[in-house]
Image: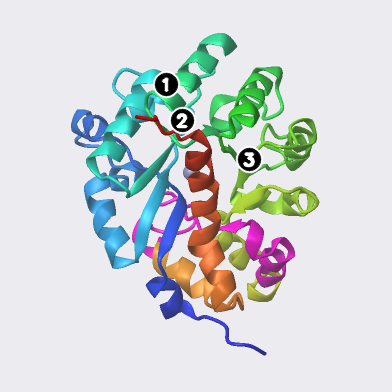
Amino acid sequence: MGEYIHASEWKALKKIDAHIHIVPDAVHRANPDAQDVWRHADVHRYREIMSENNIERAVIMPLNDPFLMSMEFTAEAVHRELATIKAAFPGQFYAFADVDVRSSAADTLDALRRAADEYCLDGIKLHPNNSGMAADSDYNNAVFAFAEERGIPVAIHSYPDTEDDVSAARRIVRIAGRYPALKLIVCHMGAMQWKELLPLGCLVDLSAILPVYVRTCGIAATREIVHAFGARRLLFATDYPDSHILQSHEIYPTYFEILGQMQFTQAEAERIAYANARALFDGRRAADAPMPVER
Ligand SMILES: [Zn+2]
């Protein structure tokens, strides 16, 4: 049946990694002896990895933990750092805005407005398990209403352990029902609760979870999961450099190895690797572009 593309072709394909982590240089400089995984989240090393793996662009996700992403420990400072990285390497990075739940909802909305309008960030990241704020909380409703109205993508970390987890799939289902026009990305595909996301229109990113599906369910069952969503809803994404089960340097080879066994056609692979993400961001940019001034 058909011509499926294999691991080496996945590596060669032009890609956007829709979920990675970069820790700003200032944070690295302040923590020279850090031994955790974030020492690999370095923009200079990561750009080499991008060119080795044909990753044209990558989406930098914050972690709703300003202590990891700035030396001032505020969402505003994180947004400034992200805008600085984007400006230093034009056309190579998208970046999502951070949310610091220690701030009031009104202050968070102000920060998100500036993130979009002044820092030109490309979306909003919610990480319920880091912030402790349930995905479908009233606090987040204000964020969703703002994002829906402005056409700004929102990525929600969803790697729940229980039905009641702060990032549980049923909470995402509730959000999608309340904000039907929201551009919603569910990170990690809702992990083992993925089935509950199938009836929604959201995109899902393959980050962190793809190798976990293979390890826990096997290749054939993983293939069924990704095809249940279909190429129009999947985003190539890794969570580099973070992984529960892989060393940072194993992440890209492992992703290509697995994707090469998922039986995607060339057209499907191009969508997953690049076109879906490009449409998400460029659609927004076109809509936001100022009207041309007549002379
Ligand atoms: Zn992540």
Q: Position of residue 255 (x, y in %)?
A: 48, 66
Measure how far apart labels 2 and 1 are at the Cα level: 8 Å
Q: Is residue 228 magenta?
A: yes
| Tag nearer the camera, 3 or 1 | 3
Residue 174: name its quadrant: top right
Q: Which residues are magenta?
A: 222-251
Q: Determine which residue is flagged by label 1.
A: 75
Measure how far apart labels 3 and 2 are at the Cα level: 15 Å
Q: Secondary structure at mark 2?
A: strand
Residue type at the position of mark 1: Ala
Q: Determine which residue is flagged by label 3.
A: 183
Marks 2/1 in contact by CB < 8 Å: the verdict is yes
Q: Is residue 242 magenta?
A: yes
Most foreground residue, 29 or 13: 13
Measure how far apart labels 3 and 1 are at the Cα level: 22 Å
Residue type at the position of mark 3: Lys
Marks 3/1 in contact by CB < 8 Å: the verdict is no
In this picture, is 256 found above or below 74?
below
Taking the image as shown, residue 8 lies to the left or right of residue 228, namely left
Q: Residue most toward the front?
A: 295
Q: Residues within 10 Å of mark 2 (few under 14, many from 20)?
A: many
In this picture, is 53 found above or below 100?
below
Q: Position of residue 102 (x, y in %)?
A: 51, 13
Residue 15: name its quadrant: bottom left
Residue 231 numbered mark, or none: none
For residue 104, say whether it is visible: no
Q: Secondary structure at mark 3?
A: loop
Pick whichever of labels 3 and 1 is earlier in the sequence: 1
Q: Position of residue 19 (x, y in %)?
A: 47, 48
Q: Determine which residue is flagged by label 2.
A: 97
Residue type at the position of mark 2: Ala
Q: Residue most toward the bottom?
A: 1
